[in-house]
Image: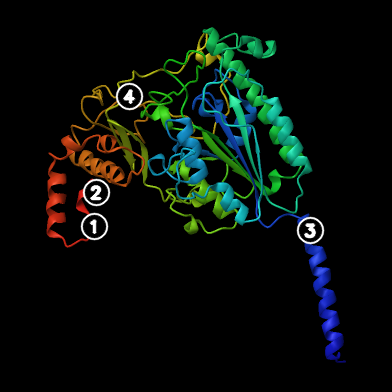
Amino acid sequence: MFLSSALLKRVLLLLHLVTSCSADFNDDNKPAHPHIIFVTLRDMGWDDASFHGNPEIPTPNIDRIANHGVILQQYYTTPNCEESVSAFRTGKHPIHYRKPNPEEVVRVTYDIWNYLDIQSYVIREVGSIDCQDTNVPFYPWDVIQKSEYILREHSKLYPLFLQINFPQLHADYPEQVPDEYLERAKHIRFEARRIYAGLVMQLDRAIGHLIRILYDTGVLHNGILVFTTLTGGTKGNNFYTWPSTYPFRGGNGTLWEGGSRGLGFVYSNRIQRRGRVSYGLVHITDWLPTIFRLAGGNPDHVVEGDGMDVWDSINADDYSPRMEILYGIYGNRAAVRVGDFKLIIGESYVPFSPRPLAKGELDNMMKPVTVWDSELECANYPDAIGCWPDISPCLFNVRFDPCERNNVAYFMPQTVEALSYSLNRYNGTAIYRSKRDLDPMEEEYKQTPAYKKTIKKLKKSKTTLDREKIKL
């Protein structure tokens, strides 16, 4: 029995409608692209989350979501909060971008909101990032309440990008910490650290509420959750904030590892290999192209960005495409990492700070549940060579020596020259630095054989580049 062409068309149309309705019912009206929840934390130290092994301040809610996701063990921000914010939003390193003054006319710079708007994302932000030290008491529940309203009112037909900015952790108001948290932190010696621990435990409970809301609304089932700090822990003269950057030296504002090694992890049901530590290099500028790819865009279409798409490294534990990290160039202070090696020059000496210990033996405290290799320890170097970067450049293998204890510059002069070349290459591309700040090691580097050989090659070549503007 054969159907007429008109009847056959009607049957095919009916089958298409039935299939479409069935697909919509099975997908629960899910959007084509995942929801993206980006959470920022102010002034929280790398070692203040107990999933890195420190039992002093328990953070069970943060640990649970981090241990079931991917912990970014080699994740870098910038040493300064304002620069990290601009680096995240524009995907550009601070040497290639700065905020214009109101009277200045500059080129239009696309930020992450522009790229997500192209992909038809609903964009929301809760809380503000004020990089100045604030006197407002720490109260994360306003952020949670506003986030819950957005999540429950959002139509599931459209993908959502929600940036949640928690307030600054600062311990200048003891009365802002409920008594229950102070009681749980009574084993900590110093009062400021005890108050700070109460703030972190309060933050952990707030994040637990956030995770529950994400589950109840179904956003997390089809979403990607990113947690990141904006800098390393704030140290130095800021008495009221006592984060722990162990095992790293230094803190916010310095070029040591503690200044820009960030606390970061990613959770999603879409991740192929979860419950692990990722050692791929990730920089805060990488979030823009990575998020744009997750939103369905082409990361190669990001305009003049310095970031790289690192999703394959996070998702499947592939090699990270990033091989270099520029910590920053600040006058005579500069630092760069290539592979496992880091060159630092001009920075002031900072003594190594051990992990804060609570009263009593650390072994008697309940150890947190950690993922294999999530805790970094300082290697033992009996004959370690010290480092004073303000006197001479220092070289460290920060993969195996994250504490920056053993300066190997004397034994590896060729590596010092190679990283010096990389640093001066960044100097040559710096747009928003004065000429005085462009060449932190120009006079010293011009005496090296590598520089002289490169100059000879340039003179022999027929390149049309302006050699006067090239800094090698």
The amino acid type of the residue labelled 1 equals Leu
Q: Secondary structure at mark 3?
A: helix
Within 10 Å of the Cα at label 4, are there few (<14), some (14-19), or many (20+) other Cα atoms?
few
First of labels 1, 4 by sequence position? 4
Task: Kindly identify which residue carries mark 4.
Answer: 380
Are the residues at dot 1 and dot 4 in contact (C-beta closer than 8 Å)? no
Residue 256 visible in image: yes
Q: Nearer the viewer, mark 1 or mark 4?
A: 1
Image location of residue 85, percent across then percent down: 51, 37
Q: Is residue 278 visible?
A: no
Q: Which residue is mark 2?
A: 469
Q: Amino acid at mark 3?
A: Asn
Residue 61 higher or lower than 177, as above or below:
below
Which of pointers 2 and 4 indicates the residue nearer the eye?
A: 2
The answer to whether 34 is drawn above or below residue 78 in the figure is below
Where residue 90 sits: x, y (%)?
Answer: 49, 45
Q: Mark 1 and mark 4: span between their CA atoms?
A: 48 Å
Marks 3 and 1, the one that precedes in the sequence:
3
The residue mark sitting in front, 4 or 3, is 3
Q: Tell me the CA gap for discs 4 and 3.
A: 56 Å
Q: Which residue is mark 1?
A: 465
Q: Residue at x 68, y 30 (%)?
A: 143
The amino acid pointed to by label 2 is Lys
Q: Say which quarter of the image contains residue 55.
A: top right
Question: Are the residues at dot 2 and dot 1 in contact (C-beta closer than 8 Å)?
Answer: yes
Number of numbered discs on residues = 4
Mark 4 residue type: Asn
Residue 364 lies, in percent from the top left, at 55, 13
